[in-house]
Amino acid sequence: MNWQPNKHLHTFHGGIHPPENKNQSTQAPIEAALLPDKLILPLQQHIGQQAKSQVQVGDSVLKGQMIAEPTGYVSAAIHAPTSGTVTAIETHALPHPSGLSERCIIITPDGKDTWAELTPVADYQQLDKSELLQHIGNAGITGLGGAGFPTSVKLNPAEDSPINTLILNAAECEPYITADDMLMRERAEEVIQGLQIIAHILQPEQCLIGIENNKPEAIEALQHAVEALQLTQLIHVERIPVKYPSGGEKQLIQILTGKEVPNGGIPADIGIVCHNVGTAVAVYRAIVKGEPLISRITTITGDAVARQGNIEVLLGTPIEALLTHFDIQQNQLHRLIMGGPMMGFTLDSVALPVVKATNCILAATNRELPDPAPEQACIRCGMCADACPATLLPQQLYWFSKSREFDKALSHNLLDCIECGACSYVCPSNIPLVQYYRFAKGEIRIEEHERTSSDHARQRFEARTARLEQEEAEKEAKRKARAEAAAASKKAKTATSEDGDKAAVDPKAAVVQAALERAKARKAQKAAAAKDTADAPSADTIVNKSATEKAKDAAPVMSAVERAKARKAARAEEQGSDSEKAAQGEKKTGGLTALEKAKAKRAQNSDVPAVQEKTQEKTEGKGLSALERAKAKRAAGNDEQSAEAASNTGSDQEAKPAKAMSALEKAKAKRTQAAAQDSSATRTEDKPLSALERAKAKRASAAQTEAPAVEQAAPAPADEAKPLTALERAKLKRAQAATGNTAESVDKRAGDNTGDSVSDSAAESTEAGSEKPMSALERAKAKRATVAQSTAENSEAAAPARTTESATESPVEKPAAAMSALERAKAKRAEKAAQQAADNSNADTDKRD
Amino acid sequence: MSILTAILILLALAAVFGMILGFAAVHFKVDEDPVVDQIDNILPQTQCGQCSYPGCRPYAEAIANGDEINKCPPGGEATIHALAELLGRDFVALDEEHGEEKGKRVALIREAECIGCTKCIQACPMDAILGAAKQMHTVIADECTGCDLCIEPCPVDCIDMVPVDVTLNDWRWDLPGAPETQLIATDRSTDNTDAVKEASA
């Protein structure tokens, strides 16, 4: 045999010749797989996306059954290495330099080793590339050389880079490792057939097997296999000189073809694909036998094990079981390494599983692999640069990495470093150079990632800002449109009011004033009742809550109705004498929108959810001016009734017990008056009345009939008192608004009532809040807060006038009263949601106060 | 006469250069200070406001106008280094007044306690919180920059900032040269090699 390297071979720069230590493990044939007590299968055994578990704890699985599916293009499936039961899916430490834990599927074998149904491909020549790639992908094959890159991805290079050379990496240059060597000796035909399948997929012009001179048996076996399969035209076994790291992908390509993989590129860029021999066997088994990747050949070596050799090992086998099988001598073991002594890493524990990339377990004694000597200063000898197979400047990279000057390290092509460890090996100062490069690479990767994510964050932030600005602009436009409409309606109103009779103002005001006084009296009554029951704190909270709820429901209605009432009242007075005109208008109003009807209904059922009311109010807001006009006309129609009638009805109502009154009935003397009139006089025979009038009448009568029921259903005065207080607030406000609007001749905003001289504290605080152009929600909140305040104090009629601000500042016994309106609103809501949450909230707000 | 010639030549030159400069001022005008963009690219874009500016870009503008470069706790030392290099200033330690550098954290809503108030949604500068009124909210962890802005508005204090666990994908090697490897051989403790033995025992 000719042991001289072929003349056409090239070489790469640098390289080292560490002691091989390969003979120890090549004396015995590959041992058959052992069946451990449990198999630990990490979901992440490859580069790329973690696989997704397909099994549940307790499932029984068969050998070769897929238990985790790939979750993306760059990902690999995981299969059960034997039959058994899934006993856990949990985090377990991984054989990884980080020592991190990840999710693993843990299988307890049943010992039967029953195969699942396999789907071998009868004749792969008939299948096209994509089908074969799918088979390989489903078999979960990753590169078995050590990196663990999914093979199906590597076999599918970009369209624009046709593959002309396929290289099978059989160099196995790292000391101690003999897994590929033994595989080629014993299964050379499988290797060649696997290569043939890969060649069928990639269709290269030539296939090269790069193998180091130190494996004569393997070379012979391969050559025999090639000849036996009559593939000598396609496949060439190339013997290469022994030099570390000739098994590096880029170095092997350089040796065999003389081409260099470009900076930052992959071999496919220059038309070359490189696969490991183990991968070729896995491909052969997956296609021809249908077996997924469930085992691999691993070298167990090192002086700390009594027997050294290679074993076919099921993936997931704990390393402890392997070491025991090879008679580990615990007292000799100094370092346990996965991979070789050059590029491997130390394992912290023996409970770790064998994964797809575990080509060697090196149990070294202290004499074999002593601890690294202490790092000393760089003496700039330049030996590292001589040894570097990538023709880098390790010294410069070392300085830049150490001082965190990553930009400079990058400009010195740090990323081309293959971390082979040759520089560290030759360094006379024992500097762990590779560890510095790994650190720098990690930092650069993280920085890159952070830059990407901060760019992403900036985009999101800018998008959000733009969206908020747009929303603001839209709101502004709407507001302007509304203001214009209001101005127009105001103008129209002023024009009509000049014709109106101003004398009607006084009786109206008197009616409103009467209503106001009634409200106050009732409120005082309620407050007294509430005080009685307020002793029990739990009862108090319940009451507060119900009051808050009521208020929430009533609030939007109030503001809406309030505005409408004010307008109506003003209209009634001004147009009192203009009954014909009003009647005419009313016919128009008769066909009034569903909106109006909805509103009436809403007022009637004050328990309708607040959300619904809010939406309705919003709708109402848009068509406000139209509505107001309609209402004014309606009011004018009602004005046929005299002022005396109004006061009569008012006093009738006053005589009634407060509890017996429904919200609507109390809502406004004017409306009730109209309703009463309608219901008593015209309910059965009203022909001229519009649909709307009828609706109103119905509403009023319904309210009246409901009233006794309410009274009966309210045996506990405390429970009843609070909601009523809330309702009274509503009524009061409305009445007030009416007064104010009548006196000042109109504005639709309740907030313009500031000139009003009503001394009620709650009303004032509400006003203070509503002065600002508040949204519906804010108004509701403020009102709720007011109600909460009034119920907390139980006697706000006697309390001094108080604004929201003064309430916040004044020290009150109850924490609820001391809270600002908004905070209290929050606390209440929290209370409603969960008692615990409320506790937190109170504590929090107290702190803030 | 020669003096007059010299003056005329100089005047002519002045006029020509004046025109060139005037032309350049109009046609090569830079609207925005490009250094602001560069600074903004370095800042971590959490928009947290810990620097006392309402976002990263305002702070970038402030730095361009001479403000200190050490007011960004989320960016930490790495950001200060990058800014110092970009602006040719000296490195200054992080200003404690604006907070301390904490690792990457994300907000986590204790969902059982969330009352659905939407206040955190409004506060989030990244739109990274998902939810609706009276519905439970949740944080999209991938979008969260850990700015803390949602913590304060929460009425029931149900938002935690949890540190992000290191996974295999973002794990990195440490800088070698831990103290023990820097000692001379005779000072080294031999205990550190016993761990493997114990584990395998």
Image (spheres, grey):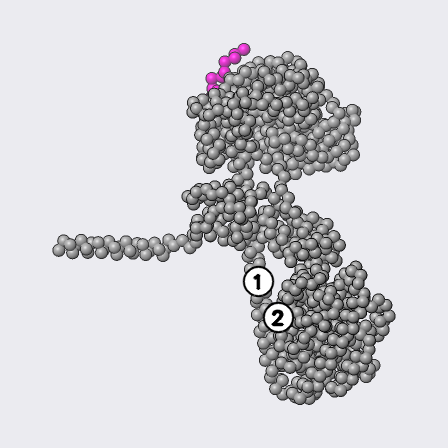
Q: Which residue occupies the foreground of this view, B174 or B181?
A: B181
What percent of the width, then of the height, locates residue B9? 20, 54
The numbered disc on residue A472 is 1
What percent of the width, then of the height, locates residue A429? 48, 22
Q: Residue at x 58, y 16 (%)?
A: A368
Q: Which residue occupies the foreground of this view, A482 or A213?
A: A482
Do marks 2 and 1 share a subunit? yes
What percent of the width, then of the height, locates residue B115? 71, 54
Q: Amino acid at mark 1?
A: Glu
Q: Amino acid at mark 2?
A: Glu
Q: Which residues lie in the magenta part?
A: A1-12
> How far is the residue under mark 2 from the one under mark 1?
21 Å
Reply above or below: A656 against B139. Answer: below
The numbered disc on residue A750 is none
Q: Is residue A241 visible?
A: yes
- The chain ID associated with circle 2 is A
Main SS class of the magenta portion in the image: loop
Q: Is residue A137 left or right of residue A266?
A: right
Residue A554 magenta-drawn?
no
What percent of the width, then of the height, locates residue B187? 54, 22
Displayed quadrant of residue A144: top right
As drawn, the residue found furthest toward the top would be: A1
Q: Residue at x 72, y 56 (%)?
A: A830
Residue under pointer 2? A771
Quarter holding the N terminus of chain B is bottom left
- Quick one: label 2, few (<14), some, or many (20+) residues within 10 Å? some
